[in-house]
Image (spheres, rainbow, N blue to C red):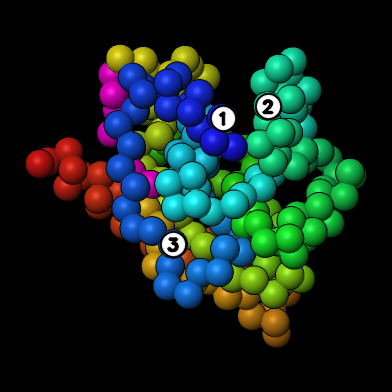
Amino acid sequence: MHVLVALMRIVFSSAMNLRIVNGPPPGFDGRAVMVGNHRSFIDFATGAIAAVKYNIPIRFLVAYEYTEIPVFGWLLKEAGAIPVYRDDDRRGGVLGDAEQALRGGYSVVIMPEGSRLSHNRENPTEMGRLHTGAARLAAQSDVPIMIVGLAGTEKAWPVGKWPRFFRREKVVFYIDQTFFHTDPNLAARANTQRLREAMTSAIVRAETELAAWKAA
């Protein structure tokens, strides 16, 4: 992961100016399901940089096709990627591998939207439909969910385009200071709806931080 982050810093240093707001929430023991909104390929880079900064050992779920890319795919696997097969999250034991990682002291990173969503300027908190995997994993492993709000990544690397090198777009990575806990009395979909509300609040904070930074 340190090697991957070093490469990312070199590659993306001219595309984004990253500001990480807050460290891990109080009481963090190194294990959590980490979730965030997904607007850009560069989202992963911001999370990896934050994990290294705060010495958080992570494994992360990534679409399997990226792990098949020569060299890059190998590097992803070496850095802790758990391949996800979109048609069946049981193929290859995805959630089982994630549970094992949590038991081993890692945090697991999941983007509940699954795919990137084009940024809606009229509604910057908009997210796609959230998959229930994060809520199920947290409940099954009895760990909290750490919520991250991302703002500005859609400009640093827009969907369907190349990264905006030499633009140094401002990007905020906001770590919510309150853990989200699943309710054992609710089904995974109901917990995921609660999670959406908490994630929306984190996005609002990230957008507010970004707007203040730009204004300054």
Q: Earlier in the sequence, mark 1 or mark 3?
A: 1
Observer able to see residue 6: yes
- Amino acid identity at mark 2: Leu
In percent of width and height, residue 53 lies at: 43, 46
Decide: is 42 above or below 125.
Answer: above
Q: Quadrant of the C terminus?
A: top left
Q: Residue at x 43, y 27 (%)?
A: 9
- Magenta residues, as a range? 167-173
Q: Is residue 54 magenta?
A: no
Decide: is 104 above or below 97.
Answer: below
Q: Which mark is residue 4?
A: 1
Q: Is residue 102 left or right of residue 5?
A: right
In percent of width and height, residue 62 lies at: 69, 38
Q: CA distance from mark 2 to mark 3?
A: 26 Å
Q: Quadrant of the N terminus?
A: top right
Q: Earlier in the sequence, mark 2 or mark 3?
A: 3
- Amino acid identity at mark 1: Leu
Q: Would you say the residues marked 1 and 2 are in contact, meaning their CB atoms lie under 8 Å apart?
A: yes
Instruction: Name the chief secondary structure element in magenta.
Output: strand
Q: Residues within 10 Å of mark 2 (few under 14, many from 20)?
A: some
